[in-house]
Image (cartoon, helix red, strand yellow):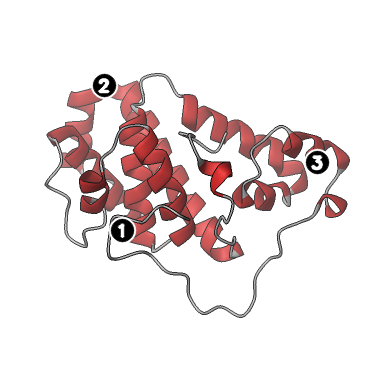
């Protein structure tokens, strides 16, 4: 990436010796290739395409996550970056620093998300979203106290959507790390975007 990451603790990949190769068009069913042609040329989408018959369902979920009514794009990006930091997922961190800036997060706010301590320097709602993200990512479950605060802030439907988003971005970071999706080298694929779609 040509833009500098605002945090000194850039998540790094491990020293793995085995990776799933990004599938080429010749490795994919024709209907999947046609779907890919309509999407930005992002490595993560190409790796998802390698799931063949699962690809359409995965793309439908990604679409739902990034277009959910009532979900604040800034809070969604906070979830993504916080999860990427906690799980040490460089791909997700680097791509979403760009998306986060594009939805209005400042470099100072982005840097706060790379704290190894609980995030407390943002506004109260963003701090709460960070707490929920931390708990689900580290403990696999949200505490009663944090859930009660989310319900008071957002109500049941939007709270459930945020929990789905936190859960999805946990799965995504684990997928990126476990398949070894290579970092993006095409700045144009990310520029101006607020989502991978």
Mark 2 closeness class: few <14, some 14–19, many ≥20 residues within 10 Å: few
| Disc 2 target residue | 155
Q: Earlier in the sequence, mark 2 or mark 3?
A: 3
> Which image quarter: residue 185?
bottom right
> From mark 2 to mark 1, how far is it between C-alphas?
24 Å
Mark 1 neighbour class, 10 Å CA radius: few under 14, some 14 to 19, many 20 or more: some
- Left/right placement of residue 102 relative to residue 22 reads left
2 and 1 marks in contact (CB < 8 Å): no
What SS does tag 3 mark? Answer: helix
Structural distance between the alpha carbons of marks 3 and 1: 36 Å
- Describe residue 144's horizontal placement relative to residue 187 as left or right: left
Q: Identify the residue under disc 3.
A: 33
Quadrant in which residue 36 is drawn: top right
148 or 15: which is nearer to us? 15
The kind of secondary structure element at disc 2 is helix
Q: Looking at the picture, does residue 142 appear above or below residue 8?
A: above
Q: Nearer the viewer, residue 69 or 123?
A: 123
Report the disc number at residue 138.
1
Q: Is residue 161 visible?
A: yes
Residues tagged 2 and 3 counted as in contact (Cβ below 8 A): no
């Amino acid at each position: 990436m040509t833009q500098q990451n605002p945090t000194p603790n850039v998540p790094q990949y491990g020293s793995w010796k085995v990776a799933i190769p990004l599938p080429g068009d010749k490795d994919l069913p024709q209907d999947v290739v046609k779907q890919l042609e309509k999407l930005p040329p992002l490595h993560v989408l190409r790796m998802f395409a390698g799931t063949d018959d699962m690809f359409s369902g995965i793309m439908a979920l990604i679409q739902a996550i990034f277009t959910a009514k009532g979900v604040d794009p800034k809070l969604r990006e906070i979830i993504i970056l916080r999860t990427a930091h906690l799980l040490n997922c460089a791909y997700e961190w680097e791509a979403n620093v760009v998306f986060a800036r594009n939805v209005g997060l400042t470099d100072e706010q982005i840097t706060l998300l790379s704290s190894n301590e609980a995030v407390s320097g943002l506004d109260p709602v963003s701090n709460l979203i960070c707490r929920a993200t931390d708990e689900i990512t580290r403990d696999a479950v949200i505490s009663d106290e944090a859930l009660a605060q989310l319900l008071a802030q957002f109500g049941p439907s939007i709270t459930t959507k945020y929990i789905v988003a936190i859960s999805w971005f946990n799965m995504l970071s684990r997928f990126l790390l476990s398949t070894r999706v290579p970092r993006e080298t095409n700045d144009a694929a990310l520029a101006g975007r607020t989502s991978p779609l």
